[in-house]
Amino acid sequence: MSSDITAAVPRPPARSASSPVLTGAQAVVRSLGLLGVTDVFGLPGGAIMPVYDPLMDDESVRHILVRHEQGAGHAAEGYAAATGRIGVALATSGPGATNLVTAIADAYMDSVPLVCITGQVFSTLMGTDAFQEADIVGITMPITKHSFLVKRAEDIPGAIAAAFEIAGTGRPGPVLVDITKDAQQNSAPFVWPPKIDLPGYRPVTKAHGKQIQAAAQLLAEAKQPVLYVGGGVIRARASAELVTLADATGAPVVTTLMARGAFPDSHPHHLGMPGMHGTVPAVLALQEADLIVALGARFDDRVTGKAALFAPNAKVVHVDIDPAEISKIRFADVPIVGDVRDVLVDLEAAFRGAAEGATPDIDQWWAYLNGLREEFPLGFAPTTDGLLAPQHVIQRIGELTGPEGVYAAGVGQHQMWAAQFIKYERPNSWLNSGGAGTMGYAVPAAMGAKVAEPDRVVWAIDGDGCFQMTNQELATCVINEIPIKVAIINNSSLGMVRQWQTLFFEGRHSHTDLHTGHGTARVPDFVKLAEAYGCLAIRVEREDEVDAAIELALATNDRPVVIDFVVSADSMVWPMVPQGVSNSEVQYARQHAPAFDEED
Ligand SMILES: Cc1cc2nc3c(=O)[nH]c(=O)nc-3n(C[C@H](O)[C@H](O)[C@H](O)COP(=O)(O)OP(=O)(O)OC[C@H]3O[C@@H](n4cnc5c(N)ncnc54)[C@H](O)[C@@H]3O)c2cc1C
Ligand SMILES: Cc1ncc(C[n+]2csc(CCOP(=O)(O)OP(=O)(O)O)c2C)c(N)n1
């Protein structure tokens, strides 16, 4: 990510005779309301208490009291990822602020627009190891687009407005506003809108016409093109424009883990997800392409495999709003910096000109790819231990809920199966932690999504390991009437790590058995745990019970539902290209695991 915000310091507003005098704390709440914020997730403590006082009476901003600040951060992320709006989290100084750090890092990796407001100790005490003092600005500097430290009441509206501007424009991301307690307590005239002055922060949204022309020419000439679609297409709300370009060019499309839903799974051009656990056609389409048009995608190592061996014959057009991404991993023959939605519109028009009304002849390419589709469809083997097949459970959740649902996943095998076996037809319907791979994301993210989209069915598809990291937010859901549905894909183990141990560590399952699912001693018993929170709780152990449980969950909207699906621990995520090998290995990797090269 580029760090071009060299001096993002808002100037204090000019005093106006008509400006009401507010405390800094009141200014925080008033600013949020004026910025259109309706929901905030947080947890109070000494250094942020002044802000909580006016928050109590404010009618425009709903505060949802979480059980752990990490939950506030992920809830704000889920809120943002489900809507494109900016998520807001609130915490006190010291441990409250550091509890937000994982979610901030997560949002940074996945380009999620987030504003985190933290209380800081009195400015006079800063640097003295004061009670609950932590340098959260310093801690978060490498994982935010910008971190503000505000020490004067009059600077608060400007800092908050600037934080929203930075979080939501250009490449979206997290911004921290750390406000000292004296700034919250002191008073100043409240001037709105504040003047925002962000020298050095100039996101480029309009791409260079010459580059668009060059890209269009390559598209018109390519024999084996692929549109490599990334999460940037969702952030840019560019799905409709993407379909138009795909239809015009006839090119196949692959969607990364972060882009599931950016392009309808039902579209005939869609080959599915590329990468380590991608479909064979998607992986080989990228690998054997002569032209890759990367659209808001960042050539992550989970997608490229061994980068030096990735797509050896492909020219690359790389479209990204963040110039730092271009040619970072793979040289871009045609670099295009800009907003991908605008670029798609311009590119389609330029392509029509370059192709002179003709459709490129890529029939041979399609014949090859369609052959791969037939030979390597996504599928899964039945289990041999009598336990449920996790893929079947997840597939049925998707089929019975449908594409209008929202699906938030944890991290691990269940995440990959949810990416593979649920059909996504619309953007913002799939929420997950891709870049950081943060276990514990699902339940609070689903909670945030449900707050933002109360009329949608929202599922958290979670692992038994992930669920144990943040399930306390079920209390938040029950108390605040946020009826999410949680499917625990309970393989009684840290399944993804166990899979790697099976494949690459000679089956030595070191410290991955969680004892949550199988046998008589379940620690914890998820049904009892969920009931203790006030959820409807169901355990499913047989295949003929799966549909009824999902249907009961879909019919229950007066409280959260938790279904403990007891699944086989031996099910594996396939296909798999092991770390550090060429993506060309994907067909073989399906049956045999090639040697694991830790160096790569
Ligand atoms: C267990 C596990 C396994 C995984 N396996 C896979 C796998 O098999 N396949 C896979 O694909 N991923 C996989 N991932 C995810 C992987 O780690 C990366 O998170 C993911 O591949 C990155 O997706 P992306 O390239 O779409 O980029 P994102 O992280 O979504 O980045 C979006 C890009 O778009 C740009 N952008 C944002 N807004 C705009 C805009 N308006 N206009 C233009 N550009 C914009 C950003 O600058 C950024 O470069 C896995 C993750 C985990 C945890
Ligand atoms: C916070 C955190 N710690 C550790 C990991 C490493 N890790 C990745 S997947 C995984 C296992 C997840 O287990 P579970 O939630 O049960 O999901 P499963 O893989 O079994 O579906 C672990 C430990 C991580 N991604 N995040």
Image (cartoon, grey):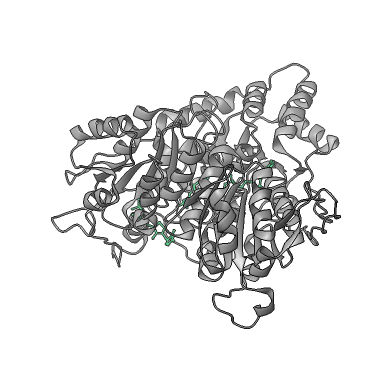
Give the side of residue 571 with respect to residue 269, left or right.
left
Q: Quadrant of residue 93?
A: bottom right
Identify the residue shown where x is 58% and y is 50%: 88
Residue 346 point in image, percent of width and height: 77, 29
Residue 391 point in image, percent of width and height: 32, 39
Residue 75 point in image, percent of width and height: 49, 49
Identify the residue shown where x is 44% and y is 31%: 423
How many labels, in total? 0
289 w.r.t. 346: above or below: below
Residue 244 visible: yes
Q: Quadrant of residue 4?
A: bottom right
Nearest to the observer: residue 589 or residue 78: 78
Identify the residue shown where x is 79% and y is 58%: 10
Residue 97 point in image, percent of width and height: 55, 65
Nearest to the observer: residue 473 or residue 265: 473
Residue 574 visible: no
Give the side of residue 596 with respect to residue 260, left or right.
left
Q: Quadrant of residue 83?
A: top right
Identify the residue shown where x is 41% and y is 46%: 415
Determine the residue located farthest toward the left in the rendered image. Answer: 520
Q: Quadrant of the N terminus?
A: bottom right
Nearest to the observer: residue 389 or residue 558: 558
Determine the residue located farthest toward the top in the rendered image. Answer: 357
151 w.r.t. 229: above or below: below
Give the side of residue 211 with respect to residue 271, left or right.
right
